[in-house]
Image (cartoon, rainbow, N blue to C red):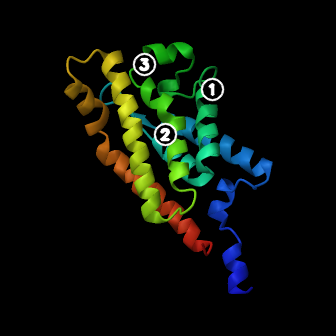
Amino acid sequence: MSQSAALSRPALADALRRSDAPLAVQVAGVVGFAALAALGAHARIYLWEVPITLQTVAVYGAGLFLGGRNGFLAMALYLTAGLVLPVFAGGASGLGYFASSASAGYLLAYPLVALLIGRWTDDRPTFLRSALAMTAGAALLFTVGVAWLHVAAGHATWWESVVKGCLLFIGWDLAKVWLVAGGYAGLRRAAGA
């Protein structure tokens, strides 16, 4: 195969983010990442009001692998499924979960985080750009999550909310960002992109 033909062919890792991908491929990606978010919710450790889960790996991955639109749709599907299925942390579900959970703000930010990551990486999904986009996505996630946590948990100060809702998670989330960015860059490299 000529080098120009190899360059015009999209990498397998980019196939899900292409707007001209077959509809069945796009739907499979959306459903797959929604399912990964549900699985990630069940891998959790409660140390305080907000659990450490693997959901954000799926959120960051949805934006990166699916692009902005489909990443948004995957996380919106996850939230919609949570209205009737026990897919949230602790096997929770239902609209009442959002009213009573201190961590619901993080969940509500998921579609926007995936959209942001996908949009920032649409034209150049390099390792560095992917890592920066996911770091910006994490900042959005923590901003919305901490604001919700402060009100829902009734913390006495904003500092308490920032510590319990953000600072205790920074190391974990940076590791997830580098893991997802590295995995995506590795897949693209292996495919010759």
Residue 136 horizontal/vertical position (percent):
40, 47
Three-letter amino acid code of the residue under disc 3:
Ser
| Along the line of sight, the residue nearer the viewer: 56 or 6 | 6
In the image, taking residue 166 as reference, residue 66 lies left or right, namely: right
Residue at the image point whose x is 64% and y is 20% from the top: 84
Amino acid identity at mark 2:
Gln
Quadrant holding the C terminus: bottom right
Disc with the residue nearer the chain's start (2 vs 1)? 2
Q: Earlier in the sequence, mark 2 or mark 3?
A: 2
Quadrant containing the N terminus is: bottom right
Question: Going from the N terminus, do you reach mark 3 or mark 1 first?
Answer: 1
In the rendered structure, the answer to whether residue 15 lies left or right of residue 126 reads right
Q: Give the camera-side residue of 119 and 66.
A: 119
Q: Residue 73 occupies which quadrant of the picture?
A: top right
| 159 w.r.t. 181: above or below | above
* Distance between mark 2 and mark 3 Cα atoms: 16 Å
Question: Mark 2 — residue?
Answer: 55
The single residue placed furthest to the bottom in the displayed view is 2
Residue at horizontal 71%, vertical 53%? 19
Q: Position of residue 29 (x, y in %)?
A: 68, 47
| Secondary structure beneath label 2 | helix
Marks 2 and 3 in Cβ contact (< 8 Å): no
Numbered label attached to residue 80: 1
Q: Which residue is mark 3?
A: 101
- Identity, as a three-letter code, of the amino acid under mark 1: Thr
In the picture shown, does residue 156 fall above or below 11? above
Tell me if mark 2 has few (under 14), some (14-19) or many (20+) residues whose alpha carbon lies within 10 angstroms of its own.
Answer: many
Q: Position of residue 91 (x, y in %)?
A: 53, 25
**Residue shown at 61%/20% (left/top)?**
83
Callout 3 secondary element: loop
- The residue at 26%/31% (across/down) is 162
Q: CA distance from mark 3 to mark 1?
A: 16 Å
